[in-house]
Amino acid sequence: MSDPDPSRPATRTGPLAEEAAVVAAAARGDRSAFTQLMEHYQGACYGLAWRLLGDPDLAADATQDAFIHAYDHIRAYRGGVFRSWLLRITANASYDILRRSQRRPTTALPEPEEGEADIADPRAVNPVAESARAELYRALDAALRLLPEDQRVAVVLCDVYGMDYQEVAESIQSPIGTVKSRIHRGRLRLRVLLADQRELFEG
Amino acid sequence: MSMTTRAHPDPERLAAMAGADPDALSDRELIAHLTDCAACDGQVRELRALRAALAELPDLVPSRPLRLLPPVPEPREAAGWRIAFRRAFAPLVVAGMVLLLVGGVGATGALGPADASAFLERLQFAAPAAPAAMEAATGQPEETAADAGMAPDELASPEASRAQIGAIATAAPRAADASPAPTESLAEVTAGQDTSRDGGLAMVEDRAGWFLAALAGVGLLALALVLRRSAVPIDRGSSGR
């Protein structure tokens, strides 16, 4: 496993300093402003894509697609939290790839292969690899991988990235009732999968 | 009946409650059950803790450097040329293929006489020369139906008609060549044709038009390929993919 890089993000990326001004500059066509935004949020977008797709290369492709879409549509951005806007685009790009990859319906992701785990394992990108927190993240990501695809997508978008039912439904083009049911079943299944590590997230 | 002895709610309702689903939060019966049932209440707390932990999952570093910006758009003029090339590609290929096909078929003789104008000329001369040809072929002056003593029925019979048409058809081209000197025999006419042209060379000369058409087709196809290559966009990618 590769050594953790101290420059790698350990937690969620917060908003960029003077983000509104940077976004406005990017919307006017300032390429360096757009680069600044993408550089800042690439970890968030890639994390979402990886958790939806479970494959480092596909996740990188989806993130790349999302950046191109964001560049083409940034003038249509109408305020709100920029991170959420970008994550919705990433979710759509990831879901498009997921549909194309013919791995539906409802299959759990395969166990990570040798080498892939170095990238996928949060401990590998977390400077506090030995801490209980890192252990918790590893356990959660491993459990998410074991969920059926439809439940995993819904739980990741709702519980990991904070989208509401409506946003999830639009991203995966499913009725809200279906989305709710998938989320609820996914949570229950995660609880069972993590039964042995309950103390990690209850502490 | 007390709440604790009542059947437990559907686990999905508990999961909804853990996620602060508005429907679950307004479900008085569910809330009352959770107040009295420690098992269900504990399950909801556990699910809430799980959600809180999921919401903390960190961002990840991409597995490879990402291209943060799409490629710079090409200058308008260059893009215009490329568009024009792309538009010309399909018509050029079609024209090239058609010319190649027609020229190739014509050059190999599948279309009949080598020179289309000569063919038409022969057709025009064939009709007036037919009586002379009949005479040349049979060695006798042409007989009319009445002279030959044929009954109208015989004249109209298919066998008679076919025989007559066959004789005219085989004699007509010869007659066209022989018409300047109608007294020449059939053997002399055909011999003159053979000796006036030098085998393959004569054929190539005759079919030069077809060969040129095929050659033009090849040229157009080559031109289309060159344009295609020059219209392929240049990859300005700077990383990753």
Image (cartoon, rainbow, N blue to C red):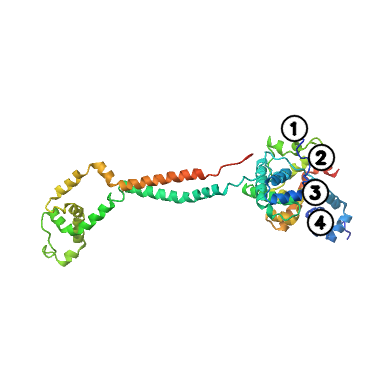
Question: Residue reaching furthest bottom?
Answer: B152
**What is the C-alpha distance between the residues marked 1 and 4?**
48 Å
> Which residue is tagged 4?
B9
Name the subunit of mark 2. A
The amino acid on which the numbered mark 1 sits, given as a three-letter code, is Asp
Q: Position of residue A173 (x, y in %)?
A: 67, 55
Quadrant where the C terminus of chain A sits is: top right
Task: Choose the circle earlier in sequence order: 4 or 3.
Answer: 4
Q: Is disc 1 on the same chain as disc 3?
A: no
* Rendered residue at 56%/42% (across/down): B234
Mark in the foreground, 3 or 1: 1
Q: CA distance from mark 2 to mark 3?
A: 15 Å
Front-lying residue, A25 or A8 = A25
Give the CA distance from mark 2 to mark 4. 33 Å
- Which of the chains bears the disc numbered 3? B
Quickly name the residue at label 3.
Answer: B51
Q: Amino acid at mark 3?
A: Arg
> Same chain for the residues at labels 2 and 1, yes or no?
yes
Q: Amino acid at mark 4?
A: Pro
Residue receiving disc 2: A133
Q: CA distance from mark 2 to mark 1?
A: 18 Å
Give the position of the N terminus of chain A as an image quadrant: top right
Q: Is A129 rendered above or below residue A172?
A: above
Question: Percent from the top left, x then y, of residue A169?
Answer: 71, 56
Foreground mark, 1 or 4, reads 1
Alpha carbon distance from label 3 to label 1: 29 Å
